[in-house]
Amino acid sequence: MKTDTQRPRPGAAILRTALRRNIGAMIAGTVLMGLYQAAETAFPIALGLIVEHTMQDRSLGSLGVSIGSLAVIITTVSLSWRFGMRVLQKANTTEAHRWRVQVAACGLQPVARDVDGLKSGEILTIATEDADQTADIIEVVPLLVSSLVAVVVAAVALSLADIRLGLLVIVGTVGILSILAVMSKRIGSSTQEQQAKVARAGAKVADLIIGLRPLHGFGGNHAAFGSYRRVSTDAKRQAVTVARVNGAYAGTALALNAVLAATVSLTAGWLAFEGRISIGELVMAVGLAQFIMEPLKMFSEMPKYVMIARASAERMALVLSAPPVTVPGPERPAPGGDLEVDGVRHGTLRGLKFTVAAGEFVAIAPYQPRAAADLVAVLAVNAAPPAYEGVVRLGGQELADLSVEAVREHMLVNPYDAEIFGGTLRTNIDPSGSSRTLPEAVEASMLTDVVALHRDGLDYAVRDRGANLSGGQRQRLSLARALAADTDVLVLHNPTTAVDAVTEQLIARNIAKLRRGRTTLVITSSPALLDAADRVLVLDEGVITAEDTHRNLLAGDEEYCLAVAR
């Protein structure tokens, strides 16, 4: 495994990717929405022509042609909008789904990524809200082009009546967009800050939910709530700031558009009064002045949506382009191999050395809980090889040369705080449905009483995080899952801290029996598990200080006796 120094991609690259792989849908959507805007613009032009010609001729035939023309225009408006938005929204939804899946895949990769301190709650927000807002660029560009079509058609039509009217529309549009482009930058920066604060509040909620039971246990729930309240208040203040900026932007855009429409109408009225344009052209000009307010509004809002999409894409880039902590090697360990820790220095570990031979059942008695946690982090590859000194070998191969998937297929490290998922007992023990030792694992973990307690047995519904199970039941369920995996090497960290002494004795014997001939390492201070092991290693101050059977250590090591005897 090597350290990866790849630099993150900017959000602009993510937006370009979204645009490139939806180019077909965007072209179709742009054509249809352009047709919609052109037909909308044609409506006041048609009314002006009707006034100019049909009413002068006073012919029923001309009136019929005019009505038919309006019907064609209205039908074009309806169908082009319907199918144009269908194409664009389908592409938008599909693209948002792709980004959500991609962010989730990054979070589920076996090698942790350097995500600049982002917590799981923040990554969840990125995978939902930011993915949706990034995909909005698929709709923004076609709507921007179609609005431009409407403005251009209106400017050309007005220029045919009088060049000054057309120039007024073009110059006014450029001026409005210039002003709003400056304001949109403030929206982008404010929105990015708001998204970050909302994500932090979500992460705080996730942390509180995970630690709710222990918080209630020592009365820390009120302090924790106060901490969340402060984070949420920051998010609220930023949301108010963003709403204020958006309101100023929308109000300015509406006012400028109204001023332009009023100016075009008054100028057309003055030109008609001077006799430079006809009554029909006046009707057309007034109608276009009222009509172009809508495409101008849409056109002027596009910079804001572009900046929001850019801000969301920048946040997605934090996850998608974050390099992995290490690049896994290509090798695979030999089946049924041993486990060797050679001179590892990490956290509280000070040159730790020991070997677990293939098929051996070894227990480690840690005098300091922090050292046990550091060892588990190294074995689980949560601390990658570049993060510590020394070497860990699995089946004779260094972890740095192995793929993380191969390590975890060969060696399972079951933490003491393993997650329980919403589902059933069966799906928690055997998520893939492929375990051949599920009944034996249930029996060995002493989960049989939980299964027998419910009429549904293994199909008994388990709530998220095991909310309807006791602490001991959750721990035994986690142990059953580890045993059912039936890996070549199994590492258990404090698997029986929440069960009574009698159950603990039975579990210790069952683990030794079920894992006979398979390499097993248990990190624990439980006398029952220590006694069931072939030998015990004493971990003190980051190194192995003693090695023998549990009973020999009890008889000859007073410090060991005080540490583990109950």
Image (cartoon, grey):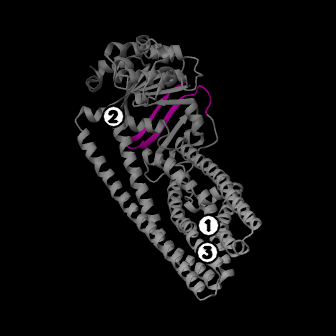
Q: What element carries label 2?
A: helix
Q: Farthest residue to the right: give it.
A: 61
> What numbered label is drawn on residue 283?
3
Q: How crowded is the residue under tag 1: few (<14 C-alpha within 10 Å), some, or many (20+)?
A: many
Measured Cα–Cα span from mark 2 to mark 1: 65 Å
Residue 383 lies, with reference to residue 546, above or below; the image says below
**Residue at image x 31%, y 47%?**
228
User: Which sits in the foreground, 481 or 455?
Assistant: 455
**Residue matched to label 1:** 147
Within 10 angstroms of label 2, few (less than 14), some, or many (20 or more) residues? some
State the residue at coordinates (36%, 54%).
235
Give percent across and percent down for residue 542: 37, 38
Residue position for label 2: 369
Identity, as a three-letter code, of the amino acid under mark 1:
Ser
Stretch in magenta = 333-359
Closer to us: 195 or 473? 195
